[in-house]
């Protein structure tokens, strides 16, 4: 299974969600933000090198702390060279999926060509947004793009939200998109874990966010099972 974590607007917590989701699913997380990578940097070859054909994708995957990751490069030259080979991403992700089973793709912000390719490569999408109007608008644009590419949305993560203050927004999103919404409140444990490039579970196991990320993973797996059952009966 290949899962794209997307949302349109930067700063809404896509990378944090991708890292924690990979931890919950025991998956490989691929930092596919070619120009502004936010996941932990590696110590060897990275996605820039893989896209350029200099190294096999499985050789660039590292275990960094408790998470298995294909890191992305940090150079502008590398990003430009990799962008020219982005059509190879489908095959790269499928290669990783065959070896590891589940792949979580941390998509860049915006609706540029690379986001479309990453969504197209995925089996399911997880949308990430905050309650702000601009973030919600961008999230719905991303949902529309995913729909046009026939990549189902498994669930939506509403970050930096308050359950009491934003429950009505969550309900409206759920009705509009037809998906369950997980509210993740602003928590110091999440920010502290991200600074250390750790999943929340490995930094503060009793934090409320741990249960929330587990819920996201559970909803994803239930959606995948439902779609698999539907495909089997068709």
Image: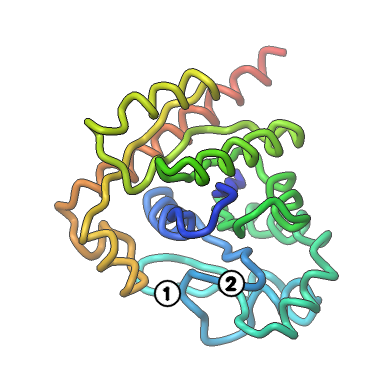
Displayed quadrant of residue 100: bottom right
Q: State the separation of the CA atoms marked 1 and 2.
A: 19 Å
Asked if 87 appears above or below 48 in the picture, the reply is above
How many other residues sit within 10 Å of disc 2, few (<14), some (14-19) or many (≥20)?
Answer: some
What is the x, y in percent for residue 234?
72, 13
Displayed quadrant of residue 66: bottom left
Q: Residue furthest front?
A: 133
Along the line of sight, the residue nearer the viewer: 30 or 11:
11
Quadrant where the N terminus is found in the figure: top right
Residue at 52%, 86% (x, y): give it.
Answer: 43
Q: Residue furthest top?
A: 233
Displayed quadrant of residue 147: top right
Residue at 62%, 65% (x, y): give it.
Answer: 33
Can residue 26 be seen here? Answer: no
Residue at 31%, 74% (x, y): give it.
Answer: 196
Q: Please give left or right for residue 165 compared with residue 54 in the image.
A: left
How many other residues sit within 10 Å of disc 1, few (<14), some (14-19) or many (≥20)?
Answer: some
Asked if 123 appears above or below 80 in the picture, the reply is above
Q: Residue furthest left?
A: 206
Residue at 42%, 32% (x, y): give it.
Answer: 219
Residue under pointer 1: 64
Identify the mark nearer the N-term, 1 or 2. Answer: 2
Residue under pointer 2: 36
Q: Secondary structure at mark 1?
A: strand
What is the x, y in percent for residue 6?
57, 48
Asked if 166 appears above or below 60 in the picture, the reply is above
């Amino acid at each position: 299974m290949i899962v794209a974590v997307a949302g349109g607007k930067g700063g809404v917590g896509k990378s944090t969600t991708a890292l924690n989701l990979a931890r919950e699913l025991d998956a490989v997380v691929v930092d596919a933000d070619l120009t502004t990578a936010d996941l932990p940097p590696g110590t060897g070859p990275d996605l820039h090198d893989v896209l350029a054909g200099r190294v096999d994708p499985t050789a660039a995957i590292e275990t960094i702390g408790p998470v298995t990751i294909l890191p992305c490069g940090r150079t502008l030259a590398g990003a430009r060279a990799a962008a020219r080979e982005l059509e190879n991403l489908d095959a790269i992700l499928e290669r990783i999926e065959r070896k590891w089973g589940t792949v979580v793709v941390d998509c860049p912000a915006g609706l540029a060509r690379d986001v479309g390719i990453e969504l197209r490569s995925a089996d399911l999408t997880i949308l990430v947004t905050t309650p702000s109007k601009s973030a919600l608008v961008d999230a719905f644009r991303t949902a529309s793009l995913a729909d046009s590419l026939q990549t189902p949305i498994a669930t939506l993560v509403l970050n930096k939200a308050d359950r009491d203050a934003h429950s009505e927004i969550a309900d409206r999103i759920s009705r509009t998109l037809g998906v369950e919404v997980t509210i993740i409140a602003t928590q110091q444990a999440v920010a502290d874990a991200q600074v250390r490039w750790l999943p929340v579970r490995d930094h503060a196991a009793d934090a409320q966010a741990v249960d929330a990320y587990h819920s996201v993973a559970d909803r994803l797996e239930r959606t995948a099972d439902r779609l698999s059952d539907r495909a089997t009966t068709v």
